[in-house]
Structures are given as structure tokens and as C-alpha cells.
Image: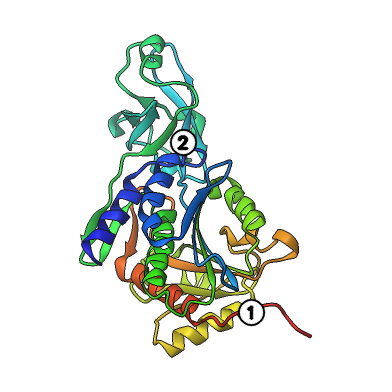
Amino acid sequence: MQTEQLDFLRKLIETPSPSSGESVAQRAWLDYVKSYADRVETDAYGNALALLHPEGSPKILLAAHIDEIGFQVQYVDERGFIYFTTVGGSDPLLARGQRVRIHHEGRAVLGVIGSLAIHLQDREGKQDPPKWHELFIDIGAQSQQEALERISIGDLITYDSGFAPLHEELWVGRACDDRVGAFVVAEALRRISARREGLQACVIAASTIQEENGLFGASMVGYSAHPDAAVVVDVGHATDIPIADKKRHGDVQLGKGPILSRGSVNHPLLVRRLAEVARKHRIPYQQGIDPRRSGTDADAIFLQRGGIPTVALGIPNRYMHSPVEVVHLQDLETLAEWLSLFVGDLQEHESFRYQW
């Protein structure tokens, strides 16, 4: 990956933006894509769009969500300890002993989620996971008043975890779900822009909000953009670790390419077209299934305006929804190239509607 693209990816992942607090990350995304678009725009809730060749047909939406899981300050006790609730789906077993940042009025206040020393624990019998309301954050305050001078009820919280190389092309960080997807959409737009001569399609690159809270931004964008087809980029579970059961969750490996799934929201004609482009250009990809739902923004987009042909593409990700998500950079580049080739291969007014 080139230095400019890697710097952008790192900036995206390290910029905090839990659901409902995406504005800083959206500005970073828009600053990058505006050079490759004919125009950029945002909507009332902060979804960000970059349009290329807006007069073209078909109209293709490339979408990924910019928000991440996190926490939110709920209560501060008389001693200054902070209690919180979840934003999105987090695992309480991972929380104790973690550093966090409380985001307050442009500042990031360091805190730690308290953990009782093992010497003081009663270790007899089965240990149940902690309940979220039992966990607390220590920012070193001595009283409620002192704590509330530094943070406020409602402040958003993220794990204090950066983005770093684990080994060669493997990188680790929090919020790879789904900043890597937002990166791929931006990178695909850059590549399409570089090859725009002969481009037939209108391309709408979208960075959506509040996926982790309920696919809310995607519902807005799917309705307002009303594309002829949509490709949603999100992460998928890499099962190439000792504790993952492939019989239950399939076989997905880091570095072997993105995931193209069949079933549920994934429109068969769109899946077939993407597979044809992959074979034509020798793009490696892995196969998955979505028997009931994809668990991505695709579930919201395909329902809009009487039905939008939609497909979800996955980036293999180890340890999803943790502070140590691991991705392979080549998978990101492969997917960006696949999307750019797919869009460039579309014929004028090409449709993915069933014709009986």
C-alpha cells in the first residue's frame, strides 16, 4: 500500500467516532475523497456522499459505515468514578483493565476501566461475566464535582487503541469495523476517478453513520440517493484462528481476498456480475453465505424505494468488536480494485432488475 493511502487509513482508524459522534471522522473522509469526486455533500444527520459522473447511468452506490462501537457516560458517583453504558455491541469480558478515552468538548480524557486485583478476588466456582452497570472508569478524580469538571454525562467513550503493524501486511487496531470499509470505498473512488474516461455509471461513494446502532444512516442514504444498485462494504469474520469453528461459521482467511456472499439481501444478478468481473480480471475472493440477513447496511438499503438490488462484500477481520481487530492490507487493496473494475465494466443503463 502506498504511503498516502496508508496514512489515510491510519487516520481514519485512529479518529474516534462512536455511533452518533461521527463528525470528526466524516470530515477526514470527505477531505480525502473530494479530490476524486465531482461534488461532495452531507445530509441532515451527517452521512457523507461523494459523487462522480453524476449524469451517468446506472447509478451505483458504494457504501460503508464510519461509526464504531463504544460507550457513553451515564453516571458519576460521589467519589468521581464514572459508570457507563454501551454504544453498539461490546463484550464485557474484554472491558476490565482497558484504557479508554472519554471525548469531551474536543479533548480526550484518559481513563481506565477498573479491575480488582487477582489477589483480592474470590476465585471459587464459575466466574460469570460482569454486567455493564458493575463496571466503572477511573480518571483519577477525587469527587463527583472534580470529575464533572473534566467530563459530562453523555460524553462518548472509545478504547485507547491505535493502528499498528502486527507483522508485514497484518495490521491491528480498534474500529477496523468499519473504517477499513470506508477506506475501501474511498480508495475505489480514487481508482475509478483515475480511469473515468469511458465511465458510463454514476458513482455515489457513501460513508454512513450509526450502523452499529441500527443501520440508521444506510436507511437514510438508500432512500435519498435511490441508486439503481448498491454495494455495501463491511467486515466479515475471519475464522483462521484456533478457537473459531469452521463447521459453524465457514472458512475465511486473512489475505485470501474479500468475501462475496450469497443469500438473503444479496441480489443474485449483482452477485453473478461481481463474480464475472472477478474471474475476468483474476481477482481472488472468498465465498460466504447470508442465509437470513447480512448484518450490514445492506439489510437497510435493499428495502428502500420498493427494493434496491444490493450486495454485501466483506473484508476478513479477526477479533471483531474488540480493541485488537486484525486485517490484511492486501484484502483492502484487492477489494478496492475489484470495485473499481466492476464499476468500470458496467454498460450504459445496465440493470439488475429481474425480467420475467
Kindly identify the amino acid type of the residue bearing the numbered disc 2: Phe
> Foreground residue, 225 or 131?
225
For the residues labelled 2 and 1, the Cα–Cα distance comes to 38 Å
Quadrant hosting residue 188: bottom left
Q: Which residue is mark 2?
A: 71
**Placement of the N terminus among the 4 image quadrants:** bottom left
Q: Position of residue 31 (x, y in %)?
A: 37, 50
Q: Position of residue 54 (x, y in %)?
A: 54, 64
Classify residue 168 as left or right of residue 160.
Answer: left
Tell me the residue at 44%/90% (across/down): 280
Q: Which residue is mark 1?
A: 268
Classify residue 165 as left or right of residue 262.
Answer: left
Which dot marks residue 51? none
**Total residue callouts:** 2
Tell me the residue at 40%/87% (across/down): 281
Q: Secondary structure at mark 2?
A: strand
In this rendering, the answer to whether 93 lies above or below 147 is: below
Q: Secondary structure at mark 1?
A: helix
Q: Position of residue 6 (x, y in %)?
A: 26, 59
Q: Residue furthest bottom?
A: 280
In this rendering, the answer to whether 62 lies above or below 280 is: above
> Foreground residue, 71 or 333?
333
Marks 1 and 2: in contact by CB < 8 Å?
Answer: no
Is the residue marked by circle 2 packed among few (<14), some (14-19), or many (20+) residues within 10 Å? many
